[in-house]
Image: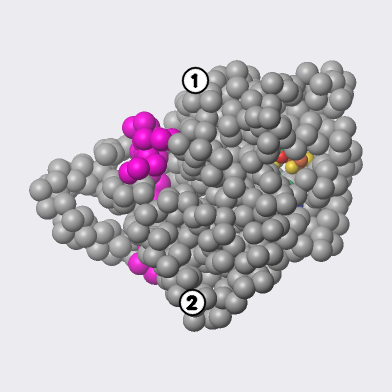
Amino acid sequence: MADVSKIRSFATAAQYTENFIIKSQIDKYLPGGKHFIDEDFINRTIAEASSREVDPVKIREIIAKSESTCETLLPEETAALMQVTDKDLFEEMRAAADRIKHKVYDNRIVMFAPLYMSNLCVNGCKYCGFREGNLEQRRRVLTMDELKEEVDVLAGRIGHKRLIAVYGEHPSTSTEYIAETIETCYNRQVASPRTGAKVGIRRVNVNAAPLPVEDLKVLRSVGIGTFQVFQETYNRKLYEEMHPAWSVKGNYDWRVTAFHRCLEAGVDDVGLGVLYGLCDWRFELLATIMHARDLERWFNIGPHTLSFPRLEPASGTRVPEESPWLIDDDTFARILVIARLSVPYTGMIVTARESPQSRNRVINHGMTQLDCSSNIAIKGYSDFAKESYQDKERQQFMLGDNRSIDEWVRYLAQRGIITSFCTAGYRCGRTGGCIMDALKTGREGKFCKINAVLTFREWLDDFASDETKALGEKVIAAELQEIERWLPKFYPTVLKQYEATCRGERDLFF
Ligand code: SAM
Ligand code: SF4
């Protein structure tokens, strides 16, 4: 394990901040001081929408536009959707959100797992268990050997193929460290417990602090998947309250321009999110849309994913219990539907922060990805025999949904949904601008279906319990029939790859 006391002495937060933030890389994206998050405009748009009666005809027009074009809605359209409280009209919105999800992403949910690399942090975010000065945390940074043990459990025991690697912000988890951890994850191969097939991690997404362009190019060179940075809140005043001015994270503009730098550096899958519960959800959602629109304006690429983290209890803080802006499950479900209609092409992630009831409920609200068998304690996967065990002293916050991957796959199969472990899009270069069009027209969804079948077959053979396997096979049979109906000429090629996978070949994809 890294020597934490040494690391702490080599940079204070202030020194780190001073050396890290490059002002010119902020100013470039705020030309003339004009900010793409215009708080007055956002507040005015919400106020105007709430001063008008909901017009069902207008709402249906907005739904139809979203569904037919798959283009990002205008702010006033999103604001109009936010006013809908009528149950039946909302149900029309939800059903459309589900149809759009099927058009763009087909009948699948993609699985991933979080992997926390470190809980050292120079920042002081008031809601977070990792913040500097929280003496209730036991600090550590994974060494590469420890990381290999974590990957062995994730890839070899659970069967994950896709990770979100998570880091505190600290000199000990520099860009070089992040790059080394990504490479270590990709290079590790283990034998699956049932078939002995070689299995490993095929996509490493990253959730880390904003980086300068040069550092992002380094991450690109080692094959980073999506780069996620959650804005936490777009409300500048609340942001400053939550993130002390002495910290790197205290710089709102450095954070909010993080994705502009990513796209400039060629890291073209970016994942936006806010921490719901810090501010009025309407403001946050509309600001997210403004953010997405600005990325589209500059780069013609929007968010690859939107995440919907909600404040959860964490060690040494009462903010998650006491914030005046906490949202209930009904509101959470509404947010997802409005987000799906507003940014129809984007992937939508709902994490294990949510309770099982909340996640079960929103499966058909437009979401596309979830994590399972998750353990977010540092070195939690290899230390605990049961993934669901939680240790508040070495994790950022507490998880709500501890279900295992086998339970989740079975549950989805019972609902007729296929679990996908596909990582092909990114490995075939279908990222950023190349994938936007394919998503909007529903073309990518067809590749997704085929790759979902192949990777699901792998997982069922390599990891599933007998009961889950039997249910999963029914889903595969239905999906294969649909592929044959859609793509009759191509079907024999698909079938050949499917049969090869059944015989034990691995990592076949289109
Ligand atoms: N340290 C980096 C940063 O803050 O950008 C990387 C991300 S941090 C490890 C992961 C995310 O967890 C944060 O962006 C925040 O949205 C979320 N988070 C922090 N405290 C939380 C809490 N109490 N409940 C739920 N999510 C929380
Ligand atoms: Fe550090 Fe991120 Fe936690 Fe803030 S949210 S204290 S930056 S780990």
Q: Are marks 1 and 2 in contact (CB under 8 Å)?
A: no
Left of 383 or right of it: where is 237? right
Residue type, numbered disc 2: Pro
Q: Going 56% across and 75% down the picture, which residue do you hit?
A: 54
- Please state if 372 lies on the left or on the right of 379 as rendered: left
**Which portion, as a residue range, is magenta?**
413-438
For badge 1, the amino acid type reads Ser
- Image quadrant in which the C terminus is located: top left
Within the magenta stretch, is there residue 471? no
Q: Is residue 335 left or right of residue 433?
A: right
Which percent across, then down, holds residue 366? 47, 61
Q: Quadrant of ligand 2?
A: top right
Residue 427 part of the magenta segment: yes
**Viewer-nearest of labels 1 and 2?**
2
Nearer to me, 365 or 256: 256
Give the class, few, some or many, for how many residues have Cα within 10 Å of label 1's Cα (few <14, many ≥20). few
Q: Residue at x 52, y 64 (%)?
A: 337
Residue 388 lies left or right of residue 409; in this view the side is right
Vertical relation: 237 (above or below) 5: below
The answer to whether residue 242 shows anywhere in this view is no
Dot 2: element: helix
The residue at the point 69 percent across, 64 percent down is 47
Residue under label 1: 221
Percent from the top left, x then y, of residue 264? 53, 25
